[in-house]
Image (spheres, rainbow, N blue to C red):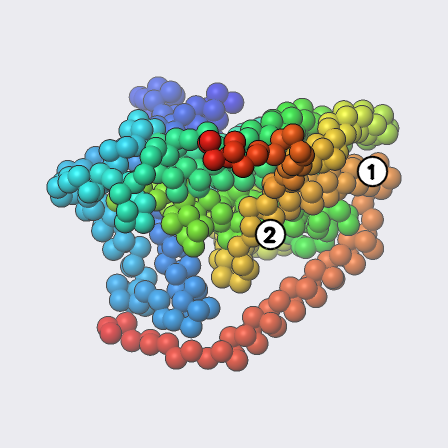
């Protein structure tokens, strides 16, 4: 068993070493003439405007949160699924099934909640009411 | 592999301690897998993909380096090796440098648990499937690092998209794989294959009516996790320049693509292991081959497995040039509103099916096999029809 997991470490070392050595060899034989233009990031040939590290959209966080919930669910169901066959052989299949389903359904209700709330929609409809709409004066002041 | 180490220790290297032999075998195995399998496979796949793309788009494609351009990937490799390696001044340098390592390792460590034949496997992990899903998620970290570290807006968008896409599609992948885990009762890939047989009606694919659906979901979401078209939004060249790898050049660029092509093999291998019987060959053939030489059945098993994987590699390449790219909102909708609920229903269905018919239902299996056979036959007919009716004149002179 220890052999099996030691193998993963060896693979990481060999894989990382392969990338590292290739980059090192590349560094030895490649030409190096750095100029200011080469150091610029690509922005369709224009001089880059501003930094790229902006606050990106909140919906990515939502996706991440939903993912964590469901991945935890799957991680917990996997061990139960491996012994499910034995439970059926012992004649306790229905109990195991109901237990898995109770656990999974609670989380699935979460998906339905998120779905109904509209968080699964990539484009959320923003309701513009009278008090959230900016007046022309406010808009020009910005 | 552990057996191999023990055999070598007992028979050949008398003086050496067991841990040293183990270490030699482990490093040897990883080097062999990397140099003799993953690297040539990724390289040749890149060439084959370009040729197929050319064929579909009525072009010729690379045909200058070696016979029919087969050595093109070596030329590309050498070219990348000699390219100036640029790191943008605006980049977050440590992240930018670390990203290709993670992308590559996320792909490469997966090969620890992927079997090649019944005895040819680096290590048959008892948590194999979980391990594969875990390591392939490291790729997502690498892609976000590449996107963020580049300091470019295109990269940033690509990286964020890659993250959202890969983690979203982990869920249907996991749920679809759960259908097989229920049936096999194990996470070890060798045990999952051992639970199936050589003939199509013995595969998990046709075990019950829910498994073909799970198979489709698994294939679609693995393609999406591999950032392949029609789900190649993170590097959508027509809108994001090149996505997360916009700022990469030279060897670093090569390694990101190396991982993507080698990932094709992993997709095919996972699907083959879970649903298509892996390396299983008929018992009669196995016995006959065993009579010829003790290693001969292993070779046949390897070829069977490899052929099944190749079918999927070609299918995924063909998909890339057949289907249009989906939009970002469609991508998320497909995942969360269709694949996840359907996969969930599949898991419930398989579990119920196992309780009601623990021995399986033979007529259902044969029916599903027949239907699948018809679909495959129609697909082959269409491809042949297409090839016959779109005759492009190709140059077959290797010296041109």
Image quadrant where one finds the N terminus of chain B: top left
**Labels 1 and 2 within one chain:** yes
Spot occupied by residue B278 in the image (x, y as percentages of width and height): 58, 47
Left or right, residue B36 beside residue B82: right
Spot occupied by residue B380 in the image (x, y as percentages of width and height): 60, 69
**Residue beneath label 1, please?**
B352
- On the question of residue B72 being in view, the answer is yes
Q: Residue at x 32, y 49 (%)?
A: A44
Check if mark 1's residue and mark 2's residue have beta carbons within 8 Å: no
Disc 1 on helix, strand or loop? Answer: helix
Disc 2 on helix, strand or loop? Answer: loop
Label 1 marks a residue whose chain is B
Image quadrant where one finds the C terminus of chain B: bottom left
Which of the numbered marks, if any, corresponds to residue B281?
Answer: 2
Left or right, residue B252 beside residue B119: left
Q: Residues within 10 Å of mark 1 (few under 14, many from 20)?
A: some
Q: Nearer the viewer, residue A113 or B52?
A: A113
Spot occupied by residue B175 in the image (x, y as percentages of width and height): 67, 37
Q: Residue at x 65, y 36 (%)?
A: A128
Residue B180 position (above or below residue A4): below
Q: CA distance from mark 1 to mark 2?
A: 30 Å
Residue B299 position (above or below residue B88): below
- On the question of residue A25 being in view, the answer is no
Label 2 marks a residue whose chain is B
Q: Residue at x 35, y 19 (%)?
A: B17
């Amino acid at each position: 068993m220890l052999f099996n997991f030691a193998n993963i470490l060896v693979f990481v070392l060999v894989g990382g070493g392969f990338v590292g050595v290739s980059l090192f060899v590349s560094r030895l034989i490649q030409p190096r003439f750095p100029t200011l233009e080469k150091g610029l990031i690509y922005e369709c040939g224009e001089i880059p405007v501003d930094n790229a590290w902006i606050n990106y959209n909140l919906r990515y966080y939502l996706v991440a949160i939903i993912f964590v919930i469901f991945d935890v669910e799957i991680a917990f169901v996997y061990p139960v699924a491996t012994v499910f066959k034995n439970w059926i052989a012992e004649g306790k299949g229905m109990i195991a099934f109901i237990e898995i389903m109770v656990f999974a359904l609670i989380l699935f209700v979460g998906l339905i909640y998120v779905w109904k709330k509209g968080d699964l929609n990539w484009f959320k409809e923003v309701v513009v009411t009278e008090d959230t709409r900016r007046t022309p004066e406010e808009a020009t002041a910005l | 592999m552990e057996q191999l180490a023990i055999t070598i220790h007992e028979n050949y290297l008398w003086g050496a301690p067991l841990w040293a032999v183990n270490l030699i075998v482990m490093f040897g195995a990883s080097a062999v897998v990397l140099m003799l399998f993953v690297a040539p496979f990724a390289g040749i796949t890149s060439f084959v993909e370009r040729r197929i793309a050319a064929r579909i788009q009525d072009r010729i494609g690379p045909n200058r380096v070696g016979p029919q351009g087969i050595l093109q990937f070596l030329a590309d490799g050498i070219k990348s090796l000699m390219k100036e390696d640029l790191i943008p001044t605006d980049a977050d340098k440590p992240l930018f440098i670390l990203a290709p390592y993670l992308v590559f390792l996320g792909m490469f460590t997966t090969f620890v648990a992927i079997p090649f034949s019944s005895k040819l496997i680096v290590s048959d992990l008892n948590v194999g499937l979980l391990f594969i899903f875990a390591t392939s998620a490291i790729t997502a970290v690498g892609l976000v690092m590449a996107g963020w570290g580049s300091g470019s807006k295109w990269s940033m968008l690509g990286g964020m998209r890659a993250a959202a896409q890969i983690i979203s599609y982990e869920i249907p992948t996991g749920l679809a794989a759960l259908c097989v885990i229920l049936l096999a009762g194990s996470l070890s890939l060798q045990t999952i294959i051992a639970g199936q047989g050589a003939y199509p009606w013995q595969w998990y694919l046709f075990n019950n009516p829910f498994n073909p659906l799970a198979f489709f979901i698994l294939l679609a979401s693995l393609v999406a996790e591999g950032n392949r078209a029609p789900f190649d939004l993170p590097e959508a060249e027509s809108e994001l320049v090149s996505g997360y790898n916009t700022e990469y050049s030279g060897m670093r660029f090569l390694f990101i693509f190396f991982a993507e092509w080698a990932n094709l093999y992993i997709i095919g291998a996972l699907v083959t292991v879970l649903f298509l019987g892996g390396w299983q060959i008929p018992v009669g053939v196995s016995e006959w081959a065993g009579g010829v030489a003790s290693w001969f059945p292993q070779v046949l098993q390897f070829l069977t497995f490899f052929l099944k994987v190749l079918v999927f590699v070609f299918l995924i390449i063909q998909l890339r040039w057949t289907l249009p790219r989906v939009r970002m909102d469609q991508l998320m909708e497909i995942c969360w509103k269709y694949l996840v609920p359907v996969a969930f229903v599949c898991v419930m269905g398989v579990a119920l099916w196992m309780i009601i018919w623990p021995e399986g239902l033979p007529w259902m299996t044969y029916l599903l096999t027949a239907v699948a056979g018809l679909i495959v036959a129609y697909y082959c007919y269409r491809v042949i029809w297409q090839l016959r009716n779109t005759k492009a004149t190709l140059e077959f002179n290797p010296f041109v």
